[in-house]
Image: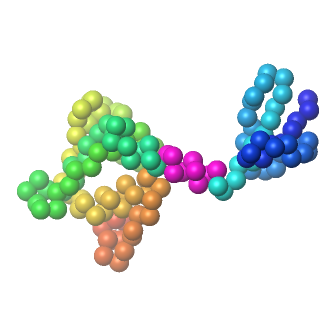
């Protein structure tokens, strides 16, 4: 079957086989075309994903972190699929037999500080987790 490579603008590049980092796009039942998967496209995908994940309309669970009586108590509206993907503990909690798996339920974590939870969530959302000398030991304890 003949193959044609296309650059990001759709211009024909060559009929040689695709390079290692190329994604195949099926455009017609009898032809196969490729689009070079460049760092610019990766960056665009990451930006679109982060924008979607930070959209409050997609948040489907609220994490309440810290003691309710504490001034450091924080609430975070989060996408449950994403945290479950990165954490087997959250996966069991949000999709297993625990009460947090029920629609509309909150996840309450009293024994973690908000700054530590923010490190974890920033990592999950592909952002800088901002690990410091002040939070690294508490972060290790939380992730253990």
Residue located at (37% from left, 37% from top): 58
**Which residue sits furthest top?**
29
Residue found at x 78% / y 47%: 7
Q: Would you say the magenta stretch is mainly helix, strand or loop?
A: helix
Which residue is depicted at the point 36% across and 71% down?
A: 136
Q: Can you see residue 70?
A: yes
| x and y percentages locating residue 82 in the rendered image | 43, 43
Asked whether, in this view, residue 74 is left or right of residue 52, the answer is: left
**Relative to 67, does residue 16 appear above or below in the rendering?**
above
Q: Magenta stretch: residue 42 in it?
A: yes
Residue beneath the point at 34% across and 33% down: 96
Q: So how many labels did they put on this image?
A: 0
Is 7 or 99 nearer to us in this picture?
7
User: How far across and down, in percent of the image, does residue 65 sit?
Assistant: 22, 53
Quadrant housing residue 74: bottom left
Of all residues, the one furthest to the left in this rendering is 69
State the quadrant of the C terminus.
Answer: bottom left
Q: Residue 36, percent across and down?
A: 75, 48
- The chosen color scheme is rainbow
Residue furthest to the bottom? 133
Q: Quadrant of the N terminus?
A: top right
Chain part drawn in magenta = 41-49
Q: Can residue 80 be seen in this view?
A: no
Residue 133: % across, % down = 35, 78
């Amino acid at each position: 079957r003949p193959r044609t490579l296309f650059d990001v603008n759709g211009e024909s590049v060559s009929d040689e086989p695709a390079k290692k980092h190329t994604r195949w796009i099926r455009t017609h039942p009898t032809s196969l075309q490729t689009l070079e998967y460049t760092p610019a496209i990766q960056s665009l995908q990451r930006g679109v994903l982060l924008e979607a994940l930070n959209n409050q309309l997609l948040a489907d669970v609220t994490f309440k972190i810290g003691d309710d009586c504490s001034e450091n108590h924080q609430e975070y509206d989060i996408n449950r699929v994403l945290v479950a993907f990165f954490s087997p503990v959250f996966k069991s909690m949000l999709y297993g037999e625990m009460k947090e798996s029920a629609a509309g339920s909150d996840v309450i974590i009293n024994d973690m500080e908000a700054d530590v939870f923010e490190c974890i969530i920033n990592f999950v959302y592909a952002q800088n987790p901002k690990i410091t000398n002040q939070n690294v030991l508490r972060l290790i304890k939380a992730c253990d």
